Image (cartoon, rainbow, N blue to C red):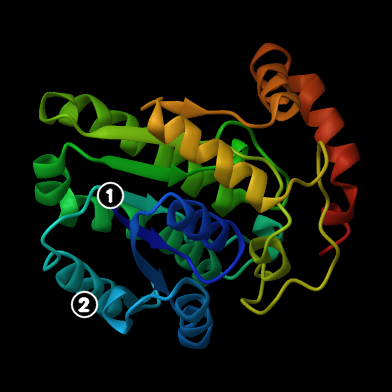
Amino acid sequence: MKHIVITGAASGLGWALAQAFHQQGHQLHLVDRDEEGLRRCSEVLGLEPSRLFVADLADRKQRATLAAALTQLSVIDVLVNNAGITHRSLVGVTDPGVFDKVMTIDWLAPVELASALLPQLRASRGSIINIGSMAGWMPVLGRAAYCSAKSALGQFFEVLRAEEHRHGIHVLMVYPAFLNTNIERNALGGDGGQARHARSTLGGVGEAAPLASAILKAWQKRRPHLFPHRGIWAASLLWRIAPGLFHTLMRRRFAVELEQH
């Protein structure tokens, strides 16, 4: 039995991961800003209230309070940095506060939590599982901040992987494509409110439960990376091999984004 911390656990991929870990008999510590959602999750899984942590990761004080509470846990075997946010807006019409919020939740919060929990993860020779995105490997029109945050996330934890190898910490970077979860339904628009235009996708939209199962298998094998959507991985290769062609195809595929100005 392992002790698992999951952020963004009340819905989407986080909830699918919580269920998958629970089915294997692990102890869960769930984090989300949605208090009512966490309560529903605890009722389904039979969790004690002490294993629920309500925190908005966009808020500095709440992140600090969360980190302090988690460091009081006697054992942490796995930190799953799943909570995330995206936007659908062109750079030229986006309030800088949107960029700040996306970078804070998608990059800074995972960095701060992992740094705070390093002593416990070293003691358990545990794992950090980061939900990245193929948007961190290639540009996606209308998601400049999201692409930047996921790229920074990957780079930070690749360095951390090398630094913590001697302490036995395992780092798994997961690079999914588009998922049928709330992250896109709750995407920010350029004004900081909810995006009002339909999202564009590439390579279809996957479901959370199969991805959660694949993540657990990769974790158990202590794999460094998981690329669950091979078609999107091939698109990232196109970006490196023929960037001009990639840009042409991207502008065509995501043309709806260019209409938002």
60 lies above or below 217: below
- Corner quadrant of residue 235: top right
Q: Which mark is residue 65?
A: 2
Identify the image quadrant of the C terminus.
Answer: bottom right
Give me the residue at 28% from left, 49% from top: 1
Q: How far apart are the alpha carbons under marks 2 and 1?
A: 23 Å
Whole-percent x and y of residue 27?
31, 60
Whole-percent x and y of residue 90?
71, 57
Query: How busy is the neighbourhood of tag 2: few (under 14 within 10 Å), some, or many (20 plus)?
Result: few
Query: How busy is the neighbourhood of tag 1: few (under 14 within 10 Å), some, or many (20 plus)?
Result: some
- Corner quadrant of residue 259: bottom right
| Residue type indicated by callout 2 | Thr
Give me the residue at 47% from left, 79% from top: 38
Q: Which mark is residue 114?
A: none
Query: For mark 1, what is the residue?
Result: 2
90 lies above or below 228: below
